[in-house]
Image (spheres, rainbow, N blue to C red):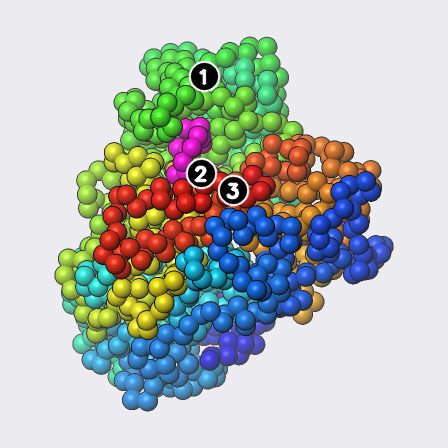
Amino acid sequence: MTDYSMYHALGQGENLDPNDLNRTVRPAAPQFQPPTAPNPYQPGAGYNAPPGQQYPPPMGGPAPAQSPGYAPYGQHPAQQQAGFSPAGPISPADDGGLAAQMGGMSLGADSGYGTARRKKKDRHAYHQVDAPVGSSQAFNGIPPAGTPATGYLNSNPVLSPGQFGSGGITPQMGQFPAPANSPFNPMPASPMEFAARGGVMDATPSPTVVSASGQNKVSPEDMPSVPLSRDSVQQYFLNNLYPTFERLVPPPATVSFAAFDQGNSSPKFARLSMTNIPATGEGLRSTALPLGLLLQPLAPLQAGELAIPVLDFGDVGPPRCHRCRAYINPFMMFRAGGNKFVCNLCTYANDTPPEYFCATSPQGVRVDRDQRPELTRGTVEFVVPKEYWTKEPVGMRYLFVIDVTQESFNKGFLESFCDGILGAIYGAEDDEEKDENGEVKRKIPAGAKVGFVTFDKEVHFYNVSPALEQAQMMIMPDIEDPFVPLSDGLFVDPYESRSVITSLLTRLPQMFSQIKNPEPALLSTLNSAIAALEKTGGKIFCSLSALPTWGPGRLFLRDDGKHPGGEPDKKLFSTEHPAWRKIAEKMVSLGVGVDFFMAAPSGGYLDIATTGYVASTTGGETFYYPNFVAPRDNTRLSLEIKHAVTRETGYQALMKVRCSNGLQISAYHGNFIQHTFGADLEIGVVDADKALGVTFSYDGKLDSKLDAHFQAALLYTTASGQRRVRCLNIIAGVSDNPKDSLKFIDQDAVYTILAKEASTKLATTSSTLKDIRLGLTEKTIDILAGYRKNFLSQSHPPGQLVMPERLKEFSMYMLSMIKCRAFKGGSETTDRRVHEMRLIRSMGALELSLYLYPRMIPLHNLQPEDGFPDEKTGHLRMPPSVRTSFSRVEPGGVYIVDNGQQCLLWFHAQTSPNLIADLFGEDKTNLQALDAYTSTLPMLQTHLNAQVRNIIEFLRTMRGSKGLTIQLARQGIDGAEFEFARMLVEDRNNEAQSYVDWLVHIHKGVQLELAGQRKREDAGEGGALSTFTGLRPSYW
Ligand SMILES: [Zn+2]
């Protein structure tokens, strides 16, 4: 196994300039500085917190059923046994319910509490090792004897595979130990050699076996654990880079890792459902898996990662293939001494443009290769000349469009939104960052401008020219035929006009306190906003607090919440309103997009299907606050405005994905407009959090001697006003035997693609919600049955559910999908459903993973070191997560549960008064004393308070677009407790089965399929669910 610590030792301390063309060493190891909360507390000082401190239960409460709930402060019962804890202990009190939930299946002698204490290695006792295909040596880092010296192994004479495999690398060896000019190597790599290119495999994948029939033992511990799959890998990536060419399957999407771009795009930008692809469509069908690519082109980087190189080829633009127009990339191969380059996507041999010519070495590698990021990095950005423009690129126009209607003012939403904008543009006064010249660091790039519009029944524009004393309001009264009532002073540099803008936003709530118009004219407002952005394009940030019932495009209460027959009419999930559809299209064509901040202060209907359609179609986002309460939601609103304004954003975008001959694009899933099939995707605005899915089909057979290539190109204008193309290059191996491909599955990409597909299907076909859920269930069975039928070399007893190692947690994610608000059965407001369906289409892998399976972290038994940087590594020591099941909840326990959309702080009714005081202050000694609208923790001088604030700061960095604030869910007190129950996705809830029942159900489907008796349409939810009727867990 390669010793990556070697690289780190070499890289550390180097002053690396990513644009330094002479740079020859690897980048430093991830110098991830854990975010820590502002902290008056110094560990070890002023607080007497011996590890053995107990949080006794309050007096007078019922006697605790089991001591683990009152575990000594600073002790993980399970962790002491297993090194890392997959889950907390199950108290015997809960065992009865759990056993019942499993329909009388035996838990086995060592079930329950004892199971949780089993050692880690014991938990793998049920995993049966599948005999590896080909040479197992392929996985140990050293290629098998006789392996041809392909590009994947090192054709660079300086670097023999042995040297590389042993981790010996010196700065003289060049930045990229694995030269990538390989696809046309005369001795191509076999799939297994492809696998061996860097020799880093986690382990030889073997199937995972869960006994899942009534006759056999089922222990909850045997079910693949999502928290375990995340936590165990996280430790590794705290200290190791992810080399994008050597590693073959990315870490789970929720894991924090620093990628080292070796010519293959980082999984943060692109994840393939499998990094080794069956050669034929038939082979792919036998796996039942989708061949898909998840793309998040502007994904954020983290500390320890090199900036994306920005390359300028002047007026000629970047070199491209003459036939397929692919951009130059590390996998194009130079021939004829450098005079030709062969396209890796279409195999066309292009003449090298004279200005780009460079001689090649005897090995066929361009001499200047290591100095050329476009030939060595998988993700690059090209500045592009005029022929790529549709209009003169300028710094982005940020237009803030503010709802000043009655409801907005009354509920404090107007004031919160104005405050949020001020914070987003200028930052809070005490956190102003200064640059090296002592100037305030700009939140909005130089060249970008801001403007302000307010609306109720009328639209008001503001002249915020720096020459004025005060902003001037211009009323645009003609909502039937909107126009822009001023030519100068609408868009200004926010720093030049700081005092005018600050005064305007501070006064706005007061200005509209007396007017109180109840009805917003949103469509007219948006039409006049795009009139203001017509010449330049740009981005709108729009608040809305009531159903827009005034003027053209007025909407009415389509959904009264009554849905006879259970599920709402599908029409309520989309809009047929021609004016709203038209404005969305118009925005995209002008290079405009919108983010909405929608608050329904009284839980009212906003017809998000229609209003939010504009955001989703233009590439924007809707931030939705059902039941907005200012004291609770202010902080979150501010965080989200700030994030939306300051995240990397581009506008006027076009996107295109290219793939190797033999493959073709079958569909795109995301938020954009595509006028005809095969045309470029048109996107009004694109930002760091947005992802889209692409699926591929076969139009021929792939050559397993070659690799498959993919290139995604995003043409856009940056917020600072530069027209660029961001290029993502992805390579995958090809196998004649699809069994090989199963070893290279990225399950996060698989379920993400399936989720996006399902959401698209719901929006664009006649499929009902029930059809969608049935489809997801059938797909899960298809995949596991396909595996068992076609690829399992050993025979397994029929009572065992066998799943590929790489899809171990896949079934759990699929169950969560059936339970999520977008797709679940039962009642749900259409606003929330539609909102979440669209979220699924735009979310990246990290955000979707959390959305489907939340992180749940116990806080009542933290170890003293948890939540503080590790002295040796500097990384924040995160406590382990537990399975999201009520069976894991301990009496007296306190848990953080974060699904990336909301973060709950759940308290058991018997929480110790000491713990409450340590978290919230000495005056708070019982749960009733806490403010229900608490959204942040106070800053206290206690160990526990500092730990939890640090943990929250860390979680804040590991999310998608939503701001993290906490919401209290006190057992028996807060309504949010129902949300907590909903988020425990391993339990029976959200109108669907528990994890155990689900596996039993899937297994039945697999058995029927194997026996040739499966009836696809009938085999849905019905059968297995009814078998276990009446066996609800005791809690809900
Ligand atoms: Zn080409």
Which residue is under mark 2? Answer: 991
**Is residue 91 rendered to the left or right of residue 450?**
right
Residue at the spot 38% in from the left edge and 51% down from the top edge: 1001
- Asked where in the image residue 392 lies, by quadrant, the reply is top left
Which residue is under mark 1? Answer: 520
- Do residues under tags 2 and 3 come within 8 Å of each other at their CB atoms? no
Of labels 2 and 3, earlier in sequence is: 2
- Residue nearest the viewer, comparing 811 with 538: 811
Residue at the spot 61% in from the left edge and 44% down from the top edge: 440
**x and y percentages locating residue 164 in the rendered image:** 42, 82
Instruction: Tell me the CA gap for discs 2 and 3.
Output: 11 Å
Instruction: Tell me the CA gap for discs 1 and 3.
Output: 46 Å
Packing grade of label 3 (10 A; few <14, some 14-19, many >=20) is some
- Do residues under tags 2 and 1 come within 8 Å of each other at their CB atoms? no
- Residue nearest the viewer, comparing 335 with 514: 514
Ligand 1 under 8 Å from disc 2 Cβ? no
**x and y percentages locating residue 165 in the rendered image:** 43, 82
Quadrant occupied by the C terminus: top right
Q: Determine the secondary structure under disc 3.
A: loop
Instruction: Judge depth for marks 1 and 3 and give the one in front.
Output: 3
The type of residue carrying mark 1 is: Pro
**Is residue 469 rendered to the left or right of residue 689?**
right
Say which mark, if any, is on residue 1032. Answer: 3
**x and y percentages locating residue 604 in the rendered image:** 49, 21
Residue extent of the magenta highlight: 821-834
- Do residues under tags 1 and 3 come within 8 Å of each other at their CB atoms? no
Of labels 2 and 1, earlier in sequence is: 1
